[in-house]
Image (cartoon, coloured by chain):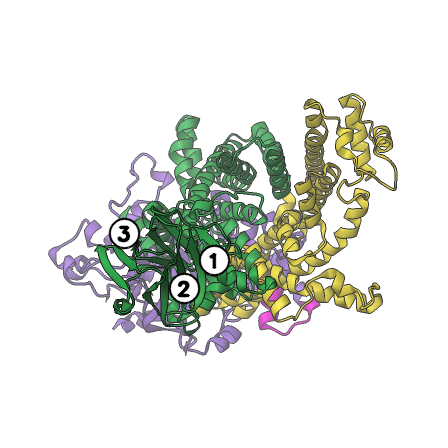
Chain colours: A green, B purple, C yellow
Amino acid sequence: MNELLRDLMSRKTFIFSLVVIGFFAVLAVAAPFLTPYNNPYRVGQQFVAAPYAVPAWATVFPQYKNLPPDVRITLTPSLAYESSGEVSQFNSSTLKVTVPPGDTVNLTFPLRWNWSSPYDVRLSFTLVTPNTQYFQVNLFVRDFYLMSLSPLPIPPEVTVVPGKPNPVIFSTELVNPGNSPYVASLPVQDQSLASLELPKVLLPKPGTYNVTLSFVNTGKTTEMFLVTLPGYSSLGYAYGRLGTDDNGASVFSEFVYGARFDLYLSLVASAIIIGIGLIIGLLAGYVGGFTDLTLNAFTDFFLLIPGLPLLIVLISIFDITGTIVNVNKAVLILLIISLLSWPGTAKIIRGQTLTLRNRTFVEAARALGESRMRILFKHIVPNLMGILFAQLAYDVPGVILAESGLDFLGLGITEFPTWGNMLGYATNNVSFVNGFAWWWVLPPGLGIVFISVAFYYFGTAMLDVLSPYKLRGE
Amino acid sequence: MSNLIFEESTDNLLQVNSLKTYYKTKTGFVKAVDDVSLFVDRAKVLGVAGESGCGKSTLVTAIFRVTPRNAQVMSGEVKYKGQDILNMDLKVFRRDIVWKEIAYIPQASMDVLDPVYKIKDQMLETILEHEDLSKADALERIYKALENVGVPAEKADMFPHELSGGQRQRVVIAMALLLNPSMIVSDEATTALDVITQAKILELMKSLQENRKFSMMFVTHDLSLLANISDSIAIMYAGKLVEFGDVEKVFGNPLHPYTQLLLKAIPDLRFRKQRRLVAIPGFPPDLENPPKGCRFAPRCPLAMPICREVEPEFSRVEGFHYVACHAVNKK
Amino acid sequence: MGLIRYLVRRIVERLALLFAILVFNFFIFQVLPTIYGINPAQLYVPLTYKGLPRSELVQALDRQFGLNLPLDERFFIYIKSLLTLHLGISMSYEQPVITLIAQRLPVTALLVIPSLILSSILAIVFGLYSISRQGKIGDSLISFTAIMTYFIPAFWLGEIVLYFFGFYLRIFPTNLGEAITTYNGHLLTGFAYWANLMKFLTLPILFITIISYGVRNILFRNNGIGLMGSNFVNYLRARGISERKILYKHVTRNAVIPVVTRVGIDLAFLFTGVVFIEDIFNIPGLGRLLVRGAENLDVPLLGGDFYVISLFAVIVLLALDLIYPLIDPRVKYE
């Protein structure tokens, strides 16, 4: 046993395969701990950052240097508020603004911005309004008149209820001519683009920008406003370990959960394939005669069925007749791929069994009167171990490639991430504009390649080590 | 040191002098041939015997310079007709010595010949590699050679797997004679053949040797084969030569305990009732870490304390009869 | 005569296999619908064809295929139709299936056969290099590359390659239609036609070559290395045959045998592999036809396609059985 291990460990390729498989196994198993998003294809888990956000670490490269991350801060007022009117601290998170009649009090919150434009801009605060109809609160960023809050329902003003706390949210995503004076002031053809353009207009480059709340008292008496310190948030263009996809979902989560699925699927499928292949190959090779003939014909038949087209047809049928829900679809794909892949393994095992059966030690055992079963399990199967492991080398990559191929064509799993459908979506969306989204396109592809190569090396190393002599003609 | 061995040589064709060929492994060296010296005289037959793993095959491959990649000649030399063939330029060696002067008869296993080429094509290739003959002439020679070894002419157009074991062995013998060499080395030429075929092949080789007068080195693990065919005998054990001498002297008066045991191990039909089959207890030593002193000591019935300390040296006992054994030397 | 008996046996086996496939086809495309109560004729008829209304088409098909006859009679008609290559009319393309297949087969063939040849040559050339430099860095590098390229998901790399060489660098045309028509929309003829066709196919051919040579390379190399230490090679060396001759004449000739088997099998199961490539590179070949058929559940097209693919596979396998004794003399006496 130790000799086996020593032999294995001396092979560089085996070490490589252990490292790679270990790495992905860890990723797959630890997935829930590595990321909170277990299905980034669901709408709720999207937009964790801007779509096509680069990975956070990519900001070391010069062309990505100024990309903003997701930002979430609470703004604090500048000291200059003392100057106009009366502003005082109501409590730790709220300010009280007292405005004399006919007067305006401006509250300025400086925003220190260190990057290029974010994807969106979002400001939120709670405004407790005076109990009259004669006031207005205006929101400005820099000099842009973004929002107008008043008790009167006149667009582009946004209605607030007097005398109550009003939660206010300004978002460039939701902005339109009906709720923002600035947008209303734009020429018509630019209005629809305002959502996209506004962040660039508001925060064009690193600098300090002012967010100003302007409290206007149009009444006859002094009124008081309460306002919480505004929260600023924006989705950035640099996010996480592997950036985001076209829906702003975390590619890293997709990758990790994809790894989980792919590994799980391929290992289970391989087990099935090797299991079936072993039984059939063993029977055909050992029993021989008529059994061999029929099993051979059976195997050849399966071999000859056009696998991929059949797969596509069956999936299409099940899709159209709506028989299968997605989780079961995975099982279905697993079963079909297994059923179409075992013939190769069976043939190889049969060949090996035949060779082994004719070797003298089996003849000797038979001469000694050992029962068939015993011969099978004591002599033949142990010598097949090498080949069985070697089949892993082909079956695992084969299953991953087949399943990924299906996903890629959009015929397999679409509801949760797999490496295959990641590649499908990524390559469909890749273009010069989004910098080829290398963080999205490359990892799944590389993942498939490395896992395949790793299992190949693993299988062939086991074959070499467990076989009494060199069998590897492939 | 061992040049005292060559004193008995009259007209030696092949001279192996203190040859050391080791295999390099990850952990050290396997001392497959460890200081072996012997010679073969013109038109004489040397039989080399020893059990599996004693180094005889390594010796043969070393002579033909076809040892595996990890084999190294550590020291010693092999001389053919006075020429150093180990250090000779490989191309010259292959062009002038190989097959023209020394030929090789391997054990004719199933795959000793290229399975995809016909017999005659392979023999043709061998001839044309060394001699500038027309195809027609070469073919004529081939058919003649096959006739000489008793292989029907139509077999030449067949593929190796279509021949029986005995026929393959004959073909391989014919192959060795194609260029009329002065010396032939055969390695286990009769192993894996049934007893009857074995006897026939042996007869064939003997008659060929007597007729054509080439020298022969006949390597085998089966000592019983050598009595009839050899002029001199060399016994190898664990990479070392333990006994070497004229065939009658060695068979008539085996000196080394190993030789004695080997001879006892030969079933003799005549003494059916009297002689028990003796197997030599124990196993050959690990050649990577051979035991100190005499390598046969662990299995030797005559082992003395000195045997486990000092390696015995060759000494001449009487005429052409050498042995390396402390027990013998003592006398 | 062992050889004749071997061949006859093989032919019988393959034909039996083909028959089994046809039964299977029949089952899927005719028996199943009948069991589920769907009139197969409905499945087999496009909405219109040459201006004829559907009802007439259904009747015509009923007559031709006897689709309203009981199953056992239908089976014979089915077999007969396959043998005479009357494969029905595609629903999505609204053309006879056999026409579609005949149109696309040459394209796929032109794509696949050069790739097969090129990748085999590449595999052997690299393999020879590896064998002669066994254990050294050149060997490791080539082997690793061979495996890497083999396991790369073709669909993924293909898109990238197509994008890069086709759209970005604009070296190759990306659309067959574009490639073979002139500016005013006429089909090119003669040399220009073929030259442009090949220009269009060059990128995918090169691509297929690169991703498929790997396995053959490794196969050849491993066999070759095993052979370099085998008994007959040692015997050749002992006879003074040069290493060069041993490698190129003896080892190659022996090591190439499993490669031929492998290539044969790859050829037989060609169509399943070529689907992705055709899809990505916009090649109107047989593979893409199959995918469209599957997506649209175009039953006549699928049935016809399945049949052609299986037929092709059986023919290739049979050819392989026939060729095999020629390259491996040991096989004659199975």
* Number of the front mark, 1 or 2: 2
Query: Looking at the image, do the residues carrying marks 2 and 3 touch, with CB atoms under 8 Å apart?
Result: no
**Side of B209 relative to A3 (left or right):** right
| Mark 1 vs mark 2, CA separation in Å | 27 Å
- Give the residue type that dot 2 points to: Phe
* Residue C37 vertical position relative to residue B18 in the rendered view, above or below: above
Q: Which residues are magenta?
A: B123-137
Residue behind mark 2? A140
Residue A160 rendering spot, x and y as whole percentages: 41, 49
Residue kind at label 3, given as amino acid type: Pro
Q: Share a chain, discs 3 and 1?
A: no
Classify mark 2: residues with Cα within 10 Å, few (<14), some (14-19) or many (20+). some
Observer-nearest of A141 and B146: A141
- Where, quadrant-wise, is the C terminus of chain B in this rendering? bottom left
- Image x and y of residue A473, in percent: 51, 52
Quadrant of the drawing holding the N terminus of chain B: bottom left
Identify the residue under disc 1.
A51
Question: Looking at the image, is C288 positioned above or below residue A379?
Answer: below
The residue that disc 3 covers is B284
Q: Can residue A106 be seen in this snapshot? A: yes
Mark whose residue sits in front, 2 or 3: 2
Q: Is residue B125 magenta?
A: yes
Which amino acid type corresponds to the residue marked 1 in the rendered image? Pro
Q: What secondary structure characterizes most of the magenta part? A: helix
Residue C250 position within the rendered picture, expressed as x and y whole percent measured from the top left: 57, 62
Of callouts 1 and 2, the N-terminal one: 1
The answer to whether residue A474 is left or right of residue C49 is left
- Viewer-proximal residue among C334 and B193: C334
